[in-house]
Amino acid sequence: MIVVTTPTGKIGSQVVQNLLAANEAVRVIVRDPARLALEVQGKVEVIQGSSDDESVLSRAFQGAESLFLVVPPSFATNNVRENYLQFARPAARAIKKQGVKRVVAVSALGRGLPMDGGVVSDSFAKDEEIERSGVDFRALWCPGFMENMLMQIDALKHQGMFFLPSRPDVKVPYVATRDIASVGARLLRDRSWTGQGGVAILGPENLSINDMAAIMTEVLGKPITYQQLLPDVYKDQLLKFGASEHFADRLVIMYAAKSNGLDNAEPRTPENTTPTSFRQWCEEVLKPAVLG
């Protein structure tokens, strides 16, 4: 039995589909079972509740051999690190109590670097807490998601622009969530690995923001330009959308760290190079969203 948290999220939902396609037994933890994709309803065992509730986790982990863990971000939190630990602490206790053998968790690049990565650095507390349980563990070390561009749909559609605080010239990896889900499902299905560590998932190429604008221009068939926001302007936008001041500050620090090499922490190898290019993702995901 493999347990999946956030089965309605961008990554968790695809992990579930990949596992079912491989005929694995899947149990999910979900607040609202009605939000599960129609194609998986009736094919997974459902534990209703929140994945920060230890009693829910204990029920979900009974008889389970592996766990796919994602901690959802909280824009409103006043302590990002503590938000990650709010989920990791009860998970670690339930993992130990129920004898879960392996955990695969979505994480980020840059652990151990001597720089403050903002929310990325805060997220590593979750990995450390799970590792202290002694369970065999693999962190999926991910750079920025291609899907984050979907938050810019209105600006792309109506203004032909997108806005971030990132430097436009720095080349870094980006990854499609489908590739994260594929690697995660493969590790969950593999019963042979042991120990603790991480696996980088870097997409097929490093791109600058300028490169991405050029690709979107070609795919969307209209000029797309990038405007770099000053940190204070970006922070004000986050606050208007309901972020706490603490979360906004930590996100601003994250973007600064990424512009200074945080996502280039792991050297590219054939093993951590995944197939979905930004151009392919734009053709298959972004273009229909913009045209729709």
Image: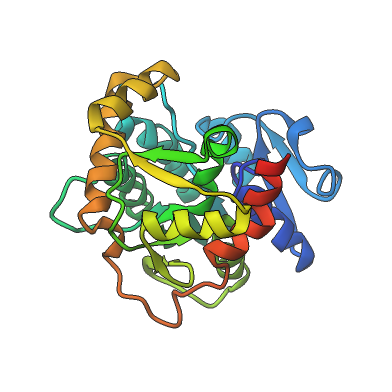
Where is residue 193 drawn, in percent x and y?
48, 75
Query: In the figure, residue 280 lies in which quadrant?
Result: bottom right
Q: Please report the residue visible at 28 percent of the width from the left and 41 percent of the height from the top.
A: 122
Where is residue 213 drawn, in percent x and y?
46, 53
Q: Please report the residue visible at 77 percent of the width from the left and 45 percent of the height from the top.
A: 45
Q: Considering only vertical position in the picture, is 8 above or below 137?
A: above
Which of 208/146 is in front?
A: 208
Where is residue 158 drawn, in percent x and y?
58, 32
> How did the renderer colour the structure?
rainbow
Left or right relative to 254: residue 55: right
Q: Please report the residue visible at 63 percent of the width from the left and 39 percent of the height from the top.
A: 59
Where is residue 64 drawn, in percent x and y?
63, 55
> In this view, which residue lies farthest toward the bottom?
270
Quadrant of the rendering where the N terminus is positioned: bottom right
Q: Considering only vertical position in the picture, is 265 above or below 54?
A: below
Left or right relative to 61: residue 23: right
Which of 50/250 is in front?
A: 250
Quadrant of the rendering where the C terminus is positioned: top right
